[in-house]
Image: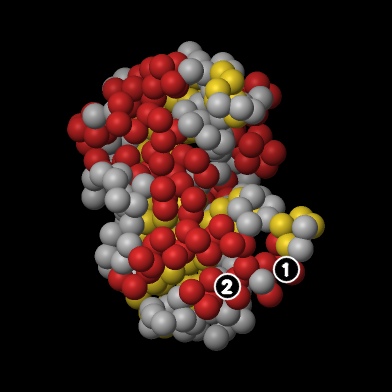
Amino acid sequence: MIKPAALRRGDRVAIISPSGTILPERVDGACKALRQWGFEPVVGQHVLCQHRSWGAVNTGGTDDDRLADLLWAITDPSVKAILCSRGGYGTVRLLERVDASLISQNPKWLIGFSDISALHALWHRAGVMSLHASMAKQLTDHGTTGEVSEAMHAFITASAMPPYAVAPHPFNRSGEASGMLVGGNLAVLSALVGTPYNLLKPGCILFIEDVGEEIYRVERLLHQLRLAGVLPSLKGLIVGQFTRYHLDGALADTATDAHHHLYSMIAHMVAPYAYPVAFDFPIGHVDRNLPLPEGTTAHLQVSPSTTTLTFTP
């Protein structure tokens, strides 16, 4: 995998909306944070566009609009990194319209998560590392300080990155594993299995998160991964945050109900396998959404006292 060049002060960072539509104040907040880091934000032409298609789904402009901004950000040599403004829906429509060789010829950090998992799959197809991380809302709400923002800055500037250490969880399965770290939104990545953009390959350490999916739908997605041979062939599994799902007709509270219901279902699904499993990892649609570099080699260690995730320099 190609690791994009580290960003330096004065580098230009493009902000684009390849998925859902974004509030103007969040773009302004992201620009402010990037300037505080010493970067020069450049905003795509269609970042604030809105397009209604297939019901109530709003995308950040038409497919052509969003594609134009994405291709500009990829090919403009003055742009050194790409920050996606938000997730939502619609990124999958762009995949087959982008020649992956453009990305490998112009390797630069892609930053985002949720529906942007589809673009991480495209970067992976091109053989280029990317950063699964928070977007404009995080930078607007929390600025450049705090664990999440500081870790994002460390990754894209190639600063020393200490291992993540996470509290143990009762459903954890102890063990150690090294492998390529890949993952993202479970629904998005599962939909790409069997396509040229599938990044869930044997021998990887997989991390997953999702939002707004019922427990039975998550189970269905995991059965798809099991039947496709993904779950049996993993080196390790990192289970992140599954937010805004319903339990007995009511919106579940992530902190308590996930522990007893959704997480127990996932633990049952992976019970036949021997690799380490870490639950309740801080990734997903939560404020503490720790950045994870897609395509790097990582070492996962799960013990009764802690979970650590170490990244290869």
Of 77 and 127, the residue lying toward us: 127
Decide if residue 141 is on the left or right side of residue 71: right
Q: Secondary structure at mark 2?
A: helix
Identify the amino acid type marked 1: Asp
Residue 202 location in percent, x, y?
A: 27, 65
> Where is 57 relative to 220, above or below?
above
> Where is 109 relative to 181, above or below?
above
Of badges 2 and 1, nearer the viewer stands 2
Sequence order check, earlier mark of 2 and 1: 1
- Residue at far right of view: 250
Label 2 – label 1 distance at C-alpha: 12 Å
Of 58 and 227, the residue lying toward us: 227
For the C terminus, the image quarter is bottom left
Residue 309 location in percent, x, y?
A: 44, 68
Q: What residue is at 59 percent from the left and 20 percent from the top?
A: 52
Q: What residue is at 43 percent from the left and 69 percent from the top?
A: 237
- The residue indicated by pointer 1 is 257
Residue 262 location in percent, x, y?
A: 62, 68
Q: What residue is at 41 percent from the left and 82 percent from the top?
A: 272
Q: Is residue 166 visible?
A: no
Identify the amino acid type marked 2: Met
Decide if residue 297 is on the left or right side of residue 161: left
Q: What residue is at 44 percent from the left and 25 percent from the top?
A: 14
Residue 186 location in percent, x, y?
A: 48, 54
Sort mark 2 into few (<14), some (14-19) or many (20+) by Cα contacts within 10 Å. some
Which label was assigned to residue 265?
Answer: 2
Of 10 and 18, the residue lying toward us: 18
